[in-house]
Amino acid sequence: MESVKKLTKITIILVFIAFAGQFVYINIILPSPFRNELKTCINNSQKLNDSMAVKIAEELCFDVYPHFN
């Protein structure tokens, strides 16, 4: 019975570590280069003269980089 409780605790800890690692990878490590590209895209879209064209260009930027919506 003791070994089952110990195995359960170890399994829960490993699952928690796996989810924490996945969260860090998806939300911190993976998007960092894309964040810079999104900022560049937004800056380029704001250089347009027409306000509607700016809005459309910004939406296209967010379509290319959907992680940051």
Image: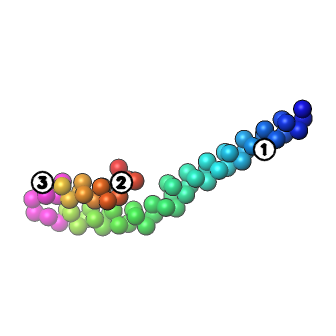
| Residue at 78% in and 44% down | 10
- Marker count (numbered): 3
Which residue lies under the disc numbered 1?
Answer: 10
Is 54 colored magenta in this rendering? yes
| Mark 3 or 1, closer to the camera | 1
Sooner in the amino-acid sequence: mark 1 or mark 2: 1
Magenta span contains residue 17: no
In the picture, measured across the screen, residue 48 lies left or right of residue 12, that is left
For mark 3, give the secondary structure. Answer: helix
Residue 49 vs residue 31, the one in the foreground: 31
Determine whether, in the image, residue 36 is placed left or right of residue 42: right
Residue picked out by circle 2: 66
- Mark 2 or mark 3: which comes first in sequence? 3
Residue 60: quadrant of the picture: bottom left
Q: Residue at the spot x=45%, y=60% of the render? A: 31
Q: Nearer the viewer, residue 14 or 39?
A: 14
Q: Which stretch is magenta?
A: 47-55
Name the residue furthest right: 2
Q: How far is the residue under mark 3 from the one under mark 1? A: 56 Å
Q: Give the structural element (helix, strand or loop) at label 1.
A: helix
Name the residue that disc number 3 marks. Answer: 52
- Image x and y of residue 30, in percent: 49, 61
Q: Nearer the viewer, mark 2 or mark 3?
A: 2
Label 3 crowd (10 A; few <14 / some 14-19 / many >=20): few
Q: Mark 3 belongs to which amino acid?
A: Met
- Alpha carbon distance from label 2 to label 3: 20 Å
